[in-house]
Amino acid sequence: MNIDIMTLFPDSVDAMLHVSILGRAIERGYISIRSHQIREYTTNKQMQVDDYPYGGGRGAVMQADPLYRCWAHIAETYGPGRTIFMSPCGRTFNQEVAKELKENYDHLILVCGHYEGIDQRFIDECVDEEISMGDFVLTGGEIPAMAVADAVCRMVPGVLPDAECFEEESHWNGLLEYPQYSRPAEWHGRQVPEILLSGDHGKVAAWRKKESYKRTMRRRPDMFARFDESQLTTKAEKRVLQQAKEELAQEDAVSKPETI
C-alpha cells in the first residue's frame, strides 16, 4: 500500500505516521507513506497557496494551481492513485470504507485542505471522492488524512502480527469489541472476570463473543440493529447470542429503580 499525503504541514504528518507500528512497517517495506509540502509547488516567491474567495466572504481559499502541481508530481513520480479530498462534505469514513480502500486500491493520494476550503476546479479535475470523519469541522485535513492512512495501513499483511489483531476489534464484523484485561488479576478491588483465568480457550472465546454482543446492544443499538443474525449457523453461536440478550435484560432490570 502506497499513500501520498498533500499537506501544508508534512512534519506533523510524518511525526505521527512514521513511528510505532506504522513506522516499523515502513522500514520493512510493507507500506509507504509520503507527505508532500504543497507550498513547494507554487510559482511565487512568497510560496503563497491561498487567495481571497471570488464572490466575497471571510477567509481564504487554497488555489487550484499549486494543488494541481503537487498532485501531478505525485502521479508522475509514483503513478496514479485514488485521489481523496478530506472534506466535511464527503461520505462518512468507517471500517467498511477502510476495508474498501485497502482491498480495491494499492495507491491513495490524500488531499488536506485548509482555510475555507480548496478551489472547486481542482476537485472537479483531480479528486475521485471526498471523505469526512463525521458531522463536525476541523481546522485542516491532516488529522482525517492520518486517520484514513492508519486505518487502511494496519490491515495490510505484515503491518500487524496477524489478521486476528484487527478482525476481532470493534466494527470489523458489525460489533463492538469485548472488554480487555491485563495483569494484575486484582486492581483497586476490581477483579478480572474469572473465566479469563480458567485457561479454557473455548469458554473464553464464547465469553468474549457474548460480551461483544452485550456491549454493542447497550452502547450502539443502531449498530446491532444492522447485525445479520442469519450469519450464526451453529446452535452454539445462537446460544451465545441468546445468553447475551438474557443477561443484558437481567442487568437492565437490576439497574432500574423500582417504581410504586
Image (cartoon, grey):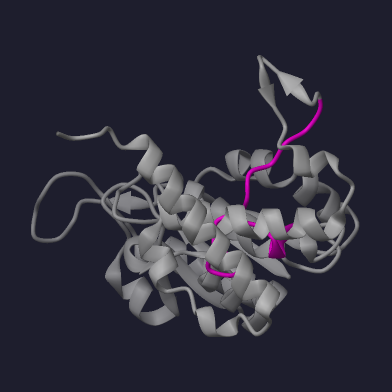
Residue 62 spot, x, y in % from top left: 34, 56
Q: Residue at x 39, y 38 (%)?
A: 254
Closer to the camera in the image, 159 or 143: 159
Q: Which residues are magenta?
A: 165-183
Kindly identify the residue that appears in the image at 66 percent across and 79 percent down.
235
Q: How many marks?
A: 0
- From the viewer's perspective, is residue 150 above or below residue 90? above
Residue shown at 78% from the left, 33% from the top: 182
- Residue 179 vs residue 142: left or right? right
Q: Name the residue located 65 percent from the left edge and 41 percent from the top edge.
A: 16
Magenta stretch containing residue 252, yes or no?
no
Q: Quadrant of residue 209?
A: bottom right
In-image side of 208 versus 20 (left or right): left
Q: Determine the image quadrant of residue 168.
A: bottom right
* Residue 182 belongs to the span the image colors magenta: yes
Q: Is residue 151 left or right of residue 230?
A: right
Mark yes or no: residue 139 visible: no
Point out the image quarter for the N terminus: bottom right
Give the x, y percent position of residue 95: 54, 66
Which percent across, then down, holds residue 170? 58, 57
Q: Is residue 129 visible?
A: yes
* In this rendering, position of residue 246 left or right of residue 254: right
Residue 9 spot, x, y in % from top left: 53, 43
Of 27 and 100, nearer the camera is: 100
In this rendered view, identify the residue nearer to me: 18 or 117: 18
Tell me the quarter of the picture where residue 67 sits: bottom left
- The dominant secondary structure in magenta is loop
Check the picture and name the quadrant holding the C terminus: top left
Q: Residue furthest top?
A: 188
